[in-house]
Amino acid sequence: MKSLGLSLVLAGAAVAHFSWIAPLTPTLTVGAVTKVQFGTGHALGTSESALPLEDLKAFVLTPSGGRVELTVAKAGLWLAADYAVKETGQHRLVFSQERGARSRTPKGIKDGGRDKNPDATQAFRTVRTAVAYAFTAGAKMDAKAAGIAYELVPERTEKAIAFTLLRNGKPCPGGEVAVSWAGKKEVLLGNTGPDGKISYTIPAGAKGAFVVLAEQRVAAAKGANYDTDNYETALYLNW
């Protein structure tokens, strides 16, 4: 496992947009409805554009193991949904979006792969996911995979958090990982090791919400009409 302290965290900065899911209320209350937000931007808490609704699946994994589907709608530069909390414990908010082949062309991004866009400079398929851990008062983290195509699974200690990156349920090496605290741009941590793991030492005095991000480009299967599968995921946590 790679272990990264604060000195390395400050050494680099990622610049790509990322997308996340988060509860508007830090602590969930049984019997109350909490607003769930979906944002896209360079910093947690500031959404610069609304995610497309096409192919978006959003749901909550409840403490008892159930799954509650979310009805998502645009809300300005955000997407939003309501979630009625019915159980005490850990709730995992999840979204997954697997978009078909698209191409970057001299006239912009177009739907379809190289077969439809012979002038494409790049053709790709995007898999975008996010998970947020949320709790009722006093509940503890019980980290586990959400069963989506690309995700980070956390393991918290007193001063650090270890993460395992999974692709299709298996440890995934080589994913580029960054972190962004609320109101701050993301900073690069490094790449997951051969076991899909990486760890992050929490900066002294840091509190509040942050996201851990991972992304990766994988060569498309032979015969595909695009070049790469582009994977990205965000994991929302509170410290």
Image: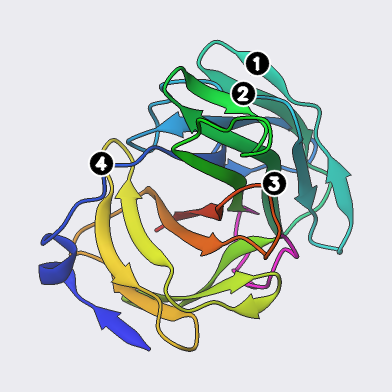
Give the dominant element type of the magenta stretch: helix, strand or loop.
loop
Above or below residue 131? Residue 204 is below
Callout 1 crowding tier (Cα within 10 Å): few <14, some 14–19, many ≥20: some
Residue 136 drawn in magenta: yes
Q: Earlier in the sequence, mark 4 or mark 3?
A: 3
Image quarter hosting the C terminus: bottom left
Q: Under tag 4, what secondary structure?
A: loop
Callout 3 crowding tier (Cα within 10 Å): few <14, some 14–19, many ≥20: many
Callout 4 crowding tier (Cα within 10 Å): few <14, some 14–19, many ≥20: some
Q: Under tag 3, what secondary structure?
A: strand
Determine which of the numbered discs, if any, sits on residue 160 in the image. Answer: none
Callout 2 crowding tier (Cα within 10 Å): few <14, some 14–19, many ≥20: many
**What distance separates the C-alpha of mark 1 from that of mark 3?**
16 Å
Q: Residue furthest right?
A: 66
Determine which of the numbered discs, if any, sits on residue 74 in the image. Answer: 1
Determine which of the numbered discs, if any, sits on residue 185 in the image. Answer: 4
**What distance separates the C-alpha of mark 2 from that of mark 4?**
20 Å
Q: Earlier in the sequence, mark 4 or mark 1?
A: 1
Q: Earlier in the sequence, mark 1 or mark 3?
A: 1
Q: Under tag 1, what secondary structure?
A: strand
In this picture, which residue range is highlighted in magenta? 134-148
The image shows residue 148 at horizontal and vertical percentages of 72, 60
Q: Earlier in the sequence, mark 2 or mark 1?
A: 1
Query: Residue 126 or 106: which is nearer the viewer?
Result: 106
Question: Is 147 placed left or right of 151 in the picture?
Answer: right
**For the residue marked with disc 1, what is the amino acid?**
Lys
Q: Which residue is mark 2?
A: 79
**For the residue marked with disc 3, what is the amino acid?**
Ser
Image quarter hosting the N terminus: bottom left
Determine which of the numbered discs, if any, sits on residue 96 in the image. Answer: 3
